[in-house]
Image (cartoon, rainbow, N blue to C red):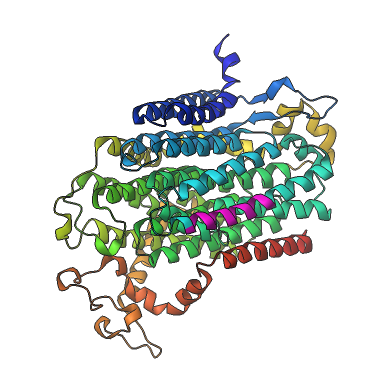
Amino acid sequence: MNFNEIVVHFPALATMVLFLGAFLVTIFGGKNRGVRVFLAMLAATCSFVMVLCVAKYVIIDGNMITYWLGNWSPVKDYAIGIGLEVDALNAFFALLVTVTTYLSGWYSIKYMSRDEGGDYYYTLYLMLSGSVLGLVLTGDIFNMFVMIEIMTFACVALTAFRNWSKGSLEAAFKYLVLGSLGSTCTLSGIALLYAQAHTLNMAQLSAFLSGTLNQPNVVLALALLLTGFGVKSYCVPFHFVAADAYQAAPASVSMLFSGMVNKAGVYGLIRVCYIIFQSMGLSTVQTLLVAIGTVSMFVGVTMALSQHDFKRLLAFHSISQIGYVITAVGLGTALGVAGGLYHAMNHTLFKGLLFLCAGAVYYATGTTNLDKMGGLSKKMPQTCLIFLIAAFSISGLPPFNGFVSKWTIYQAVYEKAVSGGIGYLFVAIVALITSVLTLASFIKVTQSVFFGHSRESFRDVKEVPGSMLVPMWILAILCVVTGVWHEQVTAKLLTPATNAVMNVTRYVDEMMGVGYAAKYMGANEVVYSSEMVTAGGIWNPWTWLMLFGIILVAFVLVSAMGKSGRGKVIDAAKSDDKHQVFFGGEVADASAVVGSDLFWGFRKNFSGYFKVLGGIHSGVVNDYAMWAVCTLAVIIVYLNVVL
């Protein structure tokens, strides 16, 4: 057998080997740490290598893989078995999943060595990775739901893994409730689709549902699936569980949540909107996704500014950065999709790296409380440098990768505004402000953790072991490489993935046979524009940097001044206890600069806004469930009114 004959089996095998690894760890790794680590890393490595081969065959060579489990191929134009269909889009997401799994696994070897129950950890780690990989590779929407269920319960268990830690069980329970709501919405939407089309194959569903968005049951199915995958992507207002879960879980698990679990939600949204329902040609659906993404961007970053815990702050930044991705793919243009996919990849790299940095700090100091840290740059110089690379990347500074993907998104939004959607200029402004606030937030973290006052209690702190540093350095190098060589990244990875999103006909015909799309879709077939517009015009890099600098200066000025109702400047020493910073009762030698409250003036000036957000983030799971249900109701009403 040649390579082409073997590689078609790899999507199924790459998923199966992760589940097999989980099974073997449970049987043979319970009493021997070395055995379970070996089995887990062997499974992760094999899966990673197979996905690399699939990516070469699909993304680089331009092929597609269709694989019918048990050889249950279609009979009389109907899919009767579970099929895997791999195009450049899900091969791209599979790469993100396996890279995250592989590096998190290496990091875990030392990071998790102090925890008990290592066999349970590696079993859940492999189950989570296998479920996400299976979700992005399947061509069957019910099989996608099965993988979502495995993913949800693995996430719940990993969130509660350190059950001795304050808040971990509560966070796991919240995840269970919100995750179950999302799964229920997904299953209900799938049931409606099956009742309509009598098939679960996504390619066949795409053909049968073409031109049916005027039917109430199809619109309801779309609303349910948007809500279900919205919960999995942690976008606002389904984001409440993310902060608690990311904070409670071990840092290696938080990397999995941020690097691949929320990408599964994004992948589901893209597949549902562009392929199954072919709804992204409608301005109403575009407006809905862009609105969700824009709100997620801004709410996430402003909530991050208020945090005093390292990992919780990073969690809100994950919400904010996913907002960029959803906004971009919601534009319905090739450039928007390319920018969204680019930022999804970059988010996996720099946010995964940031969580590993937080884990390194916790491993060395035993805390993630920003108020209890300081001066670690001398004790942990490599971690400090790696963190700065990640911080510059997420803030969108050149030449790091976040700059290129954000610039592409700004250009896509601007061109959407020029083509007639003048309201998209507001979206571009919000995106730019969000980037500035992101930089400000990481200035605060840098001051709190690595610079500022050195704590006497940390005098014996030293750099983390090499097995933790190596995965961090790999991600840091990738943050630079994918930014400097962005043209090659666009040509080799993003353009094929974008074309896969925009080409509905090929997705249908590759799975069901040539001519199937024309036979069943006919005049109802949606053709998206796949033209990749070169970024330029007013949104060139220098214009972006100039605006970025102006807004940054304005933000610093606002942050330096606390204004009362009549515009009088408030001295920090005389401000109320809630916003007290410099004289809040801290020990004198630690209160010169409190980095976690570096921008106290900003919070004071917009105290009304933060009060509203504080009320919404009540910590009560009933309230969070209510937000999810009410949002579903709003989406249903909106789609029924405008479609």
Q: Main secondary structure of the magenta part?
A: helix
Q: What stretch is highlighted in magenta?
A: 170-184
Which image quadrant for residue 122? top left
**Residue at point 41%, 89% (across, down):** 565
Q: Is residue 592 above or below residue 381?
A: below
Residue 76: horizontal and vertical position, in percent? 85, 25
Rendered location of residue 314, percent (x, y): 40, 55
Residue located 72% across and 37% down the image: 202
Residue 363 visible in this rendered orientation of the protein? yes
Is residue 522 inside the magenta stretch?
no
Residue lying farthest to the top in this orientation: 1
Image quadrant holding the C terminus, namely bottom right
Would residue 619 appear left or right of 568 to someone viewing this image? Answer: right
Locate residue 303, reporting x and y percent: 44, 65
Locate residue 303 relative to residue 81 in the image: left or right: left
Point out residue 136 in the picture as x, y percentages from the top left corner. 59, 37
Residue drawn at point x = 34 percent, y = 57 percent: 310
Quadrant containing the N terminus is: top right
Instruction: Report the front residue among 498 and 100.
Output: 100
**Disc count in the image?**
0
* Residue 178 sits inside the magenta stretch: yes
